[in-house]
Amino acid sequence: MASNQSDLKKSIMDTKTLPTLPNVIHKLNSLSDSDSSSVQEMAKIVSSDQVLSARILRLANSPSYGFHRVSTISNAMILLGVNVVKSLALSSSIIAMMEHDSIGLWEHSLGVGSAANLIAHRLKLPECEEIATAGLLHDIGKVIIKLKCSDVDKEIQLRVTTRQIYSLEAEREVLDTDHAEIGGWLAKSWFLPDKLSEPISFHHDVEKSCNNRVKTAVIHLADVLIKSSGFGDSGDDFVPSLQNIAWDILKLDKQLLDELVYELEDKLIEVKNFSFEMLSN
Amino acid sequence: MQKIPLSFAKSGMILARDVFRGDTPVGMPVCGKGSELTNALITRFEQMDVKSITVEGHPVWEEGDRSLNDYLRELDNRFAKTIQEPHNAVLHCVYKEYLIKAMEGYSGQQPE
Ligand SMILES: [Fe+2]
Ligand SMILES: [Fe+2]
């Protein structure tokens, strides 16, 4: 590694070499949400891609979403709505990038997706599925670091293990940026909506979120819970601080946490089985 | 709760999760959580190709299984950097109580 911090940062943030989304996803995103002719159009687009259809259906039935009744794409459109199917298509494409060579991170992400969904339902928040999607994608910046600079990724891991620091700190030392900023940047370059890009950018600093603080707080809490549980591997073994602002926004107290943890641990058994099944396929 | 192979199932154990035909949630549900196992039920599961079940407590100990103390030590390690902070202290307590509850009352040693 001859390059210095800012060169590395530049090369990671270079849009020309960012992974691209499959064309179908762009086609889907260009369709309007309400128009009923676009629903049929969308079903046609998705169904034309066998691999994507299969992935969407598997993900729809994953513990992060848990729609057990979904068995066909058109069924999914009717039951879940166009927006949810768009989210599913997006996450399934991104997850494909980490599923096989970052198993620990993939399990961490699935866990955070499930936890976020559970918290959102428990607090009766709107757009639970979008929140689950944000949870699945929150650490996408780590995937980018690994994909683009595997040397840097190794250096970060080395610093984490030798000095027992958070991977977030190691990233900042090595790259002068971190996975949250990189992920947010990626989300913007993919034109993802604010409700996804803000939780990705600010899940380690909830206060910075302007338009989607509640969603960001949910993802922050979901991440902290999964780290507390020791489920999966996001790069280090330490529980981050549960931020005051998230505690207040979500009106947390011990009893609520008791209930959430009990439900979450129950669900994580399913998540583990699901991840195992997906990997053995 | 603990997931065990069906061959380790004994009557008297309590199901902690629903059991499905062929072990997959897409299969037909066969028995609901909370049910107490009987020999007849176990034989039925065998016939329905159920390979593993999840039961209350932690009835089966194998070499290499972690004890409650191991789990609590790992929990403390994970919280090493943040246990001083009030919100994290609450969360640590929540998890500690959860682990104790989940591991207790497994082998019938526990009074009613
Ligand atoms: Fe993160
Ligand atoms: Fe994370």
Image (cartoon, grey):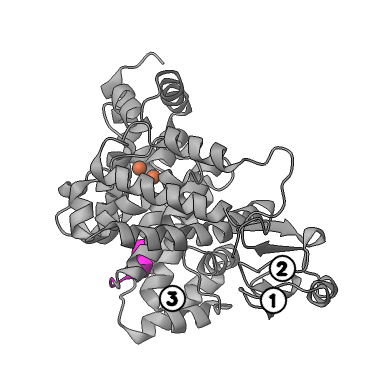
Identify the residue under disc 1: B27
Q: Determine crowd level at label 2: few under 14, some 14-19, many 20+ residues with C-alpha closer than 10 A.
A: some
Q: Which residue is mark 2?
A: B23
**Residue drawn at x 37%, y 39% as measured from the top left:** A239
Q: Split into 4 quadrants, where in the image is the C terminus of chain A?
A: bottom right
- Tags 2 and 1 touching, CB below 8 Å: yes
Q: State the residue at coordinates (65%, 69%).
A: B15
| Horizontal arrangement in the rendering, residue A18 relative to residue A267 (left or right) | left
- Which residue lies under the disc numbered 3? A42
Indicate the chain on which mark 1 is placed.
B
Q: Is mark 2 within 8 Å of ligand 2?
A: no
What's the residue type where badge 1 is placed? Gly
The Cα atoms of the two marked residues, 2 and 1, are separated by 7 Å
Query: Which segment is the magenta one?
Result: A125-131
Element type at mark 3: helix
Amino acid tagged 2: Asp
Element type where label 2 sits in the image: helix
* Label annotation for residue A221: none
* Viewer-side label of 1, 3: 1
Q: Secondary structure at mark 1?
A: loop
Mark 1: few, some, or many residues within 10 Å (few <14, many ≥20)? few
